[in-house]
Image (tube, rainbow, N blue to C red):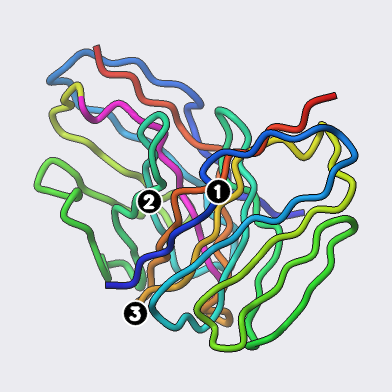
Amino acid sequence: TQLLEQSPQFLSIQEGENLTVYCNSSSVFSSLQWYRQEPGEGPVLLVTVVTGGEVKKLKRLTFQFGDARKDSSLHITAAQTGDTGLYLCAGPKRGQNFVFGPGTRLSVLP
Amino acid sequence: EPEVTQTPSHQVTQMGQEVILRCVPISNHLYFYWYRQILGQKVEFLVSFYNNEISEKSEIFDDQFSVERPDGSNFTLKIRSTKLEDSAMYFCASRDRRSNTEAFFGQGTRLTVV
């Protein structure tokens, strides 16, 4: 069974701090996606990582795909209150659908 | 920018009633999905749809659920006889056939069964 785990489950930090959240699996994924979800809304795609060892930057967000394609991390530099939300990783299962991790709920306090 | 749209945004229904949730996927996308998220819980896969038929479904997607693409643009999820535990956010997603990596989600329909 392809499962994704995310850590930490909850994270509360002050504005301006740096943070890293993790997405891990015992299975290899052909790609992993990171989404951000705000309360009452759908997940919004942030990035897709495809190649083992790949690093992608999206402004203050840095995404890394593990060399073995079993894990990924999201690092946020100088967090802002607008970064608050639920960060979800997801990957394509065998077949066509996507499996989601449980998410990391991030609160950035002013 | 193209987006997946869902209607209604919020649906309240009585237990036992039928509901139809509607989705307009991104045009030229060929794979369609329904997911649900019970409040505070994980996003769970329900069903995928390709070439006018279900390609995969989860154990959640029992006989009370059905999907349809009636007119080439809309993609609907029907729940025949709603139960209290069907209360959740339901998300539609679509994917381009050229990519097996990215799915784009709608804003969701919040279904409340009372």
Using the image, tell me which numbered label, if any, was put on residue A8: 1
Among the 4 quarters of the image, the one containing residue A69:
bottom right
Could you tell me which chain the residue with mark 2 belongs to? B
Could you tell me which chain the residue with mark 3 belongs to? A
**Residue at x 31%, y 67% (from the top left corner):** B52
Give the number of the mark in front: 2 or 3.
3
| Earlier sequence position, callout 3 versus callout 1 | 1
Contact (Cβ within 8 Å) of mark 2 with mark 3: no
Q: Could you say which is closer to the camera, residue B93 or residue A53?
A: A53
Q: Quadrant of the N terminus of chain B?
A: bottom right
Instruction: Find out whether residue B93 is within the magenta segment.
Output: yes
In terms of secondary structure, where does tag 3 sit? loop
Which residues are the magenta region? Answer: B85-96
- Magenta region, mostly helix, strand or loop? strand
**Up-down: is B15 above or below A52?**
above
Question: What is the residue that sits farthest to the left in this orientation?
Answer: B63
Given the image, on which type of amino acid does mark 2 rest?
Answer: Trp
**Residue at x 54%, y 67% (from the top left corner):** B29
Residue A74: give x, y in percent of width and height: 70, 61
Could you tell me which chain the residue with mark 1 belongs to? A
What residue is shown with label 2?
A: B34
Instruction: Answer left or right for A104 relative to B39.
Output: right
Residue B10: give x, y in percent of width and height: 46, 21
